[in-house]
């Protein structure tokens, strides 16, 4: 790693901004485009465009995983992908209230985060008991 602590902090900030923030923009842009412009649930589907947007959405989530410093903890991809996945709720229930516009994605993300965090805590405790 970096011997200079200041350079290490600069690298973490750079990684977070470039990969984390840019990954979020890429993921959200691709997922919103997927759900709105390509008419995924409609009759005018372009399969190649849908597949491409799905790949770009996952790529954005992987970028966020690296930017957040959680590389290798693949369960956190569920946390990142839960936000765009929660937008499917608005396609299913088109007349959801204004509060659902913020509440559903937040509940999906927080709930998924708590589950993934509990999974890794349980996994860590199992590893420490096996090595003890």
Image: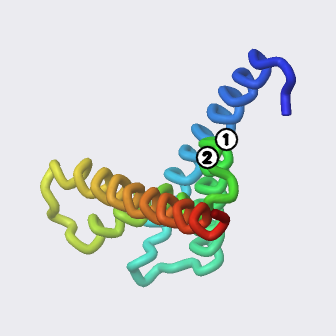
Instruction: Read off the residue under disc 2.
Output: 23
Within-10-Å neighbours for mark 1: few <14, some 14–19, many 20+: many
Percent position (x, y) of residue 46?
Answer: 57, 78
**Between residues 123 and 80, which one lies in front from this camera angle?**
123
Q: How many marks on residues?
A: 2
The N terminus sits in image quarter: top right
Percent position (x, y) of residue 93?
Answer: 20, 70
Q: Is residue 33 left or right of residue 49?
A: left
**Between residues 89 and 110, which one lies in front from this camera angle?**
110
Q: Residue at x 21, y 67 (%)?
A: 94
The C terminus sits in image quarter: bottom right
Percent position (x, y) of residue 60?
Answer: 62, 53
The colour scheme applied to this rendered structure is rainbow
Residue 79 vs 64, above or below: the answer is below
Q: Residue at x 70, y 28 (%)?
A: 14
Does the image show residue 79?
Answer: yes
Q: Which mark is residue 130?
A: none
Q: Residue at x 46, y 62 (%)?
A: 116
Q: Give the CA distance from mark 1 to mark 2.
A: 5 Å
Does the image show residue 33?
Answer: no
**Between residues 22 and 116, which one lies in front from this camera angle?**
116
Q: Is residue 54 left or right of residue 5?
A: left
Q: Check disc 2 and report its element: helix, strand or loop.
A: helix
Q: Which mark is residue 19?
A: 1
**Between residues 4 and 64, which one lies in front from this camera angle?**
4
Q: Is residue 72 left or right of residue 99?
A: right
Tag 1–tag 2 contact (CB < 8 Å): yes
Q: Residue at x 69, y 30 (%)?
A: 12
Residue 16 vs 65, above or below: the answer is above
Q: Check disc 1 and report its element: helix, strand or loop.
A: helix
Give the quarter of the image for residue 74: bottom right
């Amino acid at each position: 790693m970096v011997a200079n602590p200041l350079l290490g902090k600069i690298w973490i900030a750079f990684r977070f901004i470039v990969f984390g923030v840019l990954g979020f923009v890429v993921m959200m842009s691709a997922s919103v485009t997927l759900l709105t412009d390509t008419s995924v649930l409609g009759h005018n589907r372009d399969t190649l465009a849908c597949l491409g947007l799905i790949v770009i959405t996952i790529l954005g989530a992987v970028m966020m995983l690296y930017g957040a410093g959680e590389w290798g903890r693949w369960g956190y991809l569920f946390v990142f992908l839960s936000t765009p996945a929660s937008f499917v709720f608005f396609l299913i229930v088109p007349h959801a209230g204004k509060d659902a516009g913020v509440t559903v994605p937040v509940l999906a993300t927080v709930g998924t985060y708590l589950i993934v965090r509990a999974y890794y805590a349980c996994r860590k405790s199992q590893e420490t008991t096996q090595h003890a």
